[in-house]
Structures are given as structure tokens and as C-alpha cells.
Image (cartoon, grey):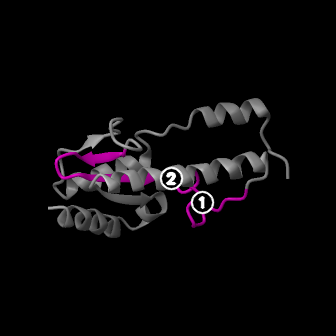
Amino acid sequence: MLDRMSKEQRSALMSRIHGKNTLPELVVRRLCRELGLTGYRLHRKDLPGSPDIAWIGKKVAIFVNGCYWHAHNCKKGSYPINTNSDFWKDKFRRNRQRDAGKIKALRANGWRVGLIWECELNNRENVSRKIAQLMTISK
């Protein structure tokens, strides 16, 4: 199956996708505030993987992953690739390896790490519970 967009159109579309302050990330930050969890820092480059949200003193980090870009095992993450599939499959494999390495490095330094998938935000109550549990255990 061929791409319905021209190469230029696809390139323009892809260039508008950013990795910071995404809608799923904003939702998770709102949930943190609703739980009374403030004082977090965003995208700390001095930490492995630049976690989306981090409480430095508590050594707690949260990554908010888009299902497609991080190849989650869900409907959005399993979207079929029809154009340049070898490139994209390799890219997603490398993304998964990189993500695992980031989490491993943080944990090796005593950090508690939470991972929230975009698809999980369909049930915000469960996500809130997940965040609260991560923070409670870290005290």
C-alpha cells in the first residue's frame, strides 16, 4: 500500500510532531497537580533519558510515552507501517532499547521510575492511582 501523501506532505506533517509538552504529558501533569503533587521538574537533561516529570528530592521520575512512537503493545502502538517499513521498524526497536536503558540507568542510581502510556489515559482514575502509589512508596 502506498502512502496517500506526497513525500513533502509527509515530511511537513512529521516535522510538527514534538517530544515535549505533548497532550498526554499535559494530562499527566494535571493529574499530578490534582493529587497535590507539586514541586516536580520537567525534562531534566541532567538525568538519564530526561524524564518528562521528576521529583529530584524524592528520586521519582515519570516517563509519559506515546504508544506509537515507543511501540507499545496496544492498538495505537501496533499501527501497520506501509511506507519505508524497514526504517521505521528499526527505529521503533532502537526506541524500545533506548527507553529500557534510560529506566535501567535511573534505577541503578536509586530512582523510582514510572511509565505511563498514552493509551492508559483513557482511564485517568487508574493513572492517578498509579502515580499516587509511585509517590507513596517513595517516601
Q: Tell me if residue 117 is in the magenta stretch.
A: no
Q: Residue at x 27, y 69 (%)?
A: 129
User: Quick one: label 2, few (<14), some, or many (20+) residues within 10 Å?
Assistant: many
Residue 31 picture location, percent across and down:
28, 56
- Which corner quadrant holds the C terminus? bottom left
Q: Residue at x 21, y 45 (%)?
A: 56
Report the side of 66 relative to 121 (left or right). right
Which comes sooner in the sequence, label 2 or label 1?
Answer: 2
Which residue was labeled with disc 1?
77
Tally of marks: 2
Q: Residue at x 48, y 40 (%)?
A: 19
For this rendering, which residue is in front, 35 or 94?
A: 94
Question: Disc 1 residue type?
Answer: Gly
Element at label 2: loop
Q: How far is the residue under mark 2 from the one under mark 1?
A: 8 Å
Report the side of 11 relative to 47 (left or right). right
Residue 135: which quarter of the image? Answer: bottom left
Residues in magenta? 51-80
Report the magenta stretch's main SS: loop
Q: Tell me if residue 62 is in the magenta stretch.
A: yes
Residue 15: which quarter of the image? Answer: top right
Residue 90 picture location, percent across and down:
69, 50
Which residue was labeled with disc 2?
66
Report the side of 62 relative to 16 (left or right). left
* 46 to 94, vertically: above or below: above
Residue 18 picture location, percent across and down:
51, 37
Residue 30's disc is none
Element at label 1: loop
For this rendering, which residue is in front, 101 or 76?
A: 101
User: Quick one: label 1, few (<14), some, or many (20+) residues within 10 Å?
Assistant: some
Cβ atoms at labels 2 and 1 below 8 Å apart:
no
